[in-house]
Image: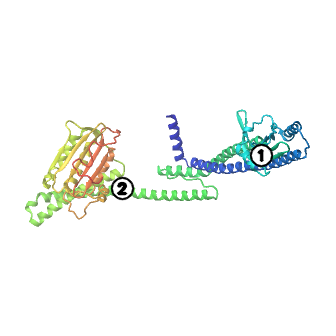
Amino acid sequence: MRFRGVASWAIGLFRRSLQVRAVLTTLVTSGIALAIVGGFLSYSIGNGLFATRQAQVLAESSRAVVEVQNTFSASSVSNEVALQTLMNTIVPSIESTGTTNSRKVALLRSPGQANTQVLQSPISAELDVKIIPASLRERVRKSAGKLLYQSIAIPTGSDQHPGIVVGAPVQIPLAGNYELYLVFDLNSEQQTLDFVQRTLIFGGLMLMFMIGAISFFVTDWLVRPVRMAAEVSEQLADGALDRRLPERGEDIIAVLARSFNRMAQSLQNQITQLASLSKMQQRFVSDVSHELRTPLTTIKLAGDMIFASRDSLSPPIKRSAELMHDQIERFQQLLNDLLEISRYDAGAVTADLEMQDLNGIVGMAIAGIEPLASSKGSAIEIDIPNGAVEAEIDGRRIERLLRNLLANAIEHGEGKPIKVAVGMNESAVAVSVTDAGVGMTRTEVDRVFDRFWRADPARKRTTGGTGLGLAISLEDTHLHDGWLQVWAKPNEGASFRLTLPRRKGMVFTQSPLPLPPKKAKKGGIR
């Protein structure tokens, strides 16, 4: 578990830090380059040492073979004892027992000879003739006086040293054909190569450390302005529009800082202008709405008097009085909605939260909208749980929100039944309003909460809506930290689902009601 935690932390650091990625990339590429160069140098030095020592070995062996052959050729011995004595002097004369250039000698009789005079083969002390390969002896016997050599491993206790054995045929009068072998120990060269390799490895590690340290400081110097730009960008995104980068020097970093500061200044100016314009627009809407309330009140009073006396008027004037009364009512509702939306834009709306029964609020919303449903021929079907569904909500705003959803469903439901469902779980409550009317496309769903937007501008509005109902409903939902979601499919209807936390500050991740509804066909739009 600890290893996994460390690995996860390291991976996270690698993903987050540009500097760490740059340093690691530099170290990996430098390590690969050093490994290639070090391997090449080690191989070249090893081959050079071996080639030099091999040339020296062959030269020494050639002189030794000529010396031995001349010794026997110039000898005038005529008996076995004298010849054996002469042979025994060969090994001490050409062997070397130094610590750096050890050379052992063996004078071996070639097998398969008919000569009956067999003498003892002189061999250097501590030389095991078994290390001389049989294949090499076979080639030496068949050679025409040439020097032949082969690399071997010389056992020394529990270790082995690299070596070279050189062989050549020798003719000994009265004794027949013999083979002279010189075994050279290359341990000195191997130690030199080992020292060079250790030096290369140690030097490579030191160089890697230096490269890592240099790359760390260089990347830190280069990344620091980028890191500072990221921090300033985050502060700008959080609203600190006066934050700027320091401008020093004339290099590309200074150019970046100046460009960034100009961009930040331009954004600050534009945001300030937009904020000022937005405040002016909000104030304009609020002031106009307030100013219109007084003349509208007068017009409404006069219109109500005319509407109350419409029966005594001629038919054309009576119809005009009815139309004026309807439009005055719609105008008043529009002013109320404008005032409400302007209060939301100004951030002046607070929720009056208290524990209430959501079933009761749904019932009041249905009761208020039922005359409209009856006039449109739409039956309202209710599916609510038994008992109270309590939640901490602003009952007045939630009732208004549900009336807006019901009015919207009746408007587009084409006289078909409207289904209202209520659900609850441990952390949330929900209400869904579903119709089986004209539905909406994906583009229409994306804009359904826009202000003054209508799915079909050519469609006649019969419920007297202002075009702000769903926008205000969304603001009321956000005021409760809830969700207002929609599912729709053309010619199959639409379903709006309101999900609210049961207590203020309570977090929920799932709604108690499904969307799309269970009886809705699959393939709708969310």
Residue closer to the observer: 465 or 486: 486
x, y (%) of residue 313?
Answer: 9, 63
Residue 506, which numbered label? none
Indicate which disc, 1 or 2, sits on the residue closer to the N terminus. 1
Residue 493: quadrant of the picture: bottom left
Residue 354: quadrant of the picture: top left
Residue found farthest to the bottom: 316
Q: Check disc 1: other Cα within 10 Å, few if <14, some if 14-19, many if 20+.
A: many
x, y (%) of residue 468?
Answer: 28, 55
Residue closer to the observer: 515 or 301: 515
108 to 238, vertically: above or below: above
Residue closer to the observer: 261 or 256: 256
x, y (%) of residue 2?
Answer: 51, 34
Tell me how far mark 1 sits from mark 2, CA to CA. 105 Å
Badge 2 marks a residue whose secondary structure is helix
Residue found farthest to the top: 157
Badge 1 marks a residue whose secondary structure is strand
Report the side of 351 relative to 122 (left or right): left
Q: By what rule are the colours in the image chosen?
A: rainbow
Question: Which amino acid lies under the numbered mark 2 shown in the image of this protein?
Answer: Gln
Residue at numbered disc 1: 166
**Quick check: can you spot residue 161?**
no
Question: Which amino acid lies under the numbered mark 1 shown in the image of this protein?
Answer: Val
Report the side of 283 relative to 231 (left or right): left
x, y (%) of residue 113?
Answer: 77, 43
Residue at numbered disc 2: 282
